[in-house]
């Protein structure tokens, strides 16, 4: 059996998809370990997980990226993401990844697309690696028509390779030349010409229900709508959440709402039979009870909702979210609204559309069927095993 090292950034949404893949590989007899932030990885992968510690980028908080000025959008937000988070994170993680490779002696690395230290260290040490792509935006032409931006990112990666990797290397560290595991399907992301991209669907693994929830509050005679902007958008979400609260309370005769408010921007939670406001919810379990989701088009939230056949109202803010929102609308599984120009009326009308038009739910269920057929964590593990058979084993590499 083989040894597989998972390299992950300090982001919950990027660790979660790999947890199921690692568990599947371990169940098949492989030895797995992690390079990342132990206090983030172990609660998700299990307290017995072997985690080699890696530093985080200066200014980053465990579980989230470096906080950005809330007004940043578009290319300004992208510039901040690369210069203030991705590049510093790679430099911070590289020593820990190298130490993990030395101590664990893996046959293969499975590396999150935003943990750039992983492929660069693997390249320098002559190890094969697979990409774990927790969003499909990068390989669906998100930067088409922006050659200057693409060239700028390429320059950053070249500089990073000279500091951390093999200066003679040629592979884009965002895309393994061996295998890119995409946790989505063509039914949502659109078909891809690149044969190295393997659509495996979401890796939905069981998660410990660490967040309490008043399940008795749910009214089986009314539709439940979940409103969430994730955990990284509390600085910009106050007006949007307030509009959602107003819109959904006005429809309390037919639905009830659960609003996730980690920053408590709506004030202290109060007893309310129509709108439940909580700082955190057990999202996967709750989605099984939902009829619609209003969100920021974060890839994980979108895929988890569609896994349950739940249509969406998407209000993208930045980064890959406009791309993912476009995928939802193109697939017919939801309605898009403008985050910066939301109002209670607009949000209410959008919710009415996804609840009343059966086409949206039919599209969501079609994508859900494609997700399940894709194989998820089991299919991803099979692809990793295939790559392990194809790449040179350690004894072969040492003789070269």
Image (cartoon, rainbow, N blue to C red):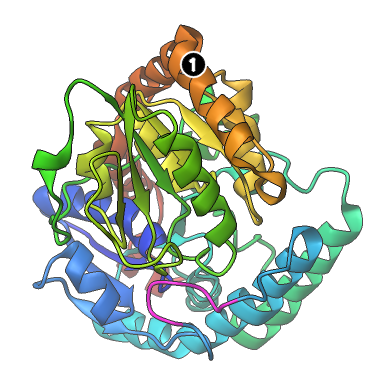
Q: Quadrant of residue 103?
A: bottom left
The answer to whether 362 appears left or right of 168 in the picture is left
Vertical position of residue 268 compared to residue 258: above or below: below
**Where does the magenta region start and end?**
61-67
Q: Quadrant of residue 253?
A: top left
Towards the viewer: 353 or 309: 353
Q: Is residue 183 visible?
A: no
Helix or strand or loop: what does disc 1 sit on? Answer: helix
Residue located beneath label 1 in the image: 360
Residue 203 lies, in percent from the top left, at: 31, 42
Vertical position of residue 338 compared to residue 55: above or below: above
Residue 155 on the magenta span: no
Main secondary structure type of the part rendered in magenta: loop
Which quadrant holds the N terminus?
bottom left
Vertical position of residue 17 compared to residue 246: above or below: below
Residue 66 on the magenta span: yes
Towards the viewer: 344 or 111: 344
């Amino acid at each position: 059996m083989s040894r597989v090292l998972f390299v992950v950034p300090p982001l919950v949404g990027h660790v979660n998809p790999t947890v199921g893949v690692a568990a599947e590989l371990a169940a098949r007899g492989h030895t797995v370990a992690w390079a990342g932030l132990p206090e983030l990885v172990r609660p998700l992968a299990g307290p017995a997980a072997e985690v080699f510690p890696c530093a985080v980028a200066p200014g980053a908080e465990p579980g989230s990226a470096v906080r950005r000025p809330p007004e940043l959008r578009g290319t300004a937000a992208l510039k901040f993401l690369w210069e203030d988070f991705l590049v510093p994170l790679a430099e911070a993680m590289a020593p820990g990844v190298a130490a993990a490779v030395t101590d664990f002696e893996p046959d293969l690395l499975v590396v999150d697309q935003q943990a750039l230290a992983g492929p660069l260290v693997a390249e320098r040490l002559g190890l094969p690696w697979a990409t774990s792509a927790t969003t499909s935006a990068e390989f669906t032409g998100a930067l088409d028509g922006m050659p200057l931006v693409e060239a700028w990112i390429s320059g950053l990666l070249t500089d990073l390779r000279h500091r951390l990797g093999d200066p003679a290397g040629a592979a884009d560290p965002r895309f393994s030349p061996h295998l890119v595991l995409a946790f989505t399907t063509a039914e949502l992301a659109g078909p891809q010409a690149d044969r190295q991209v393997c659509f495996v669907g979401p890796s939905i693994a069981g998660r410990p229900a660490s967040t309490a929830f008043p399940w008795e509050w749910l009214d089986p005679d009314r539709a439940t709508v979940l409103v969430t902007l994730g955990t990284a958008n509390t600085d910009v979400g106050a007006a949007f959440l307030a509009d959602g609260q107003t819109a959904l309370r006005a429809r309390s005769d037919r639905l009830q709402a659960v609003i996730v408010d980690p920053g408590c921007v709506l004030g202290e939670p109060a007893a309310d039979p129509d709108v439940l406001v909580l700082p955190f919810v057990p999202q996967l379990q709750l989605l099984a009870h939902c009829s619609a989701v209003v969100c920021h088009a974060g890839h994980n939230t979108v895929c988890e909702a569609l896994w349950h056949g739940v249509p969406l109202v998407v209000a993208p803010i930045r980064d890959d979210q406009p791309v993912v929102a476009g995928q939802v609308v193109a697939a017919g599984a939801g309605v898009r609204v403008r985050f910066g120009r939301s109002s209670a009326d607009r949000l209410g009308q959008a919710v009415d559309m996804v609840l009343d038009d059966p086409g949206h739910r039919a599209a969501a269920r079609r994508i859900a069927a494609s997700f399940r057929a894709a194989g998820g964590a089991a299919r991803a593990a099979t692809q990793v095993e295939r790559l392990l058979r194809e790449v040179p084993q350690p004894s072969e590499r040492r003789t070269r």
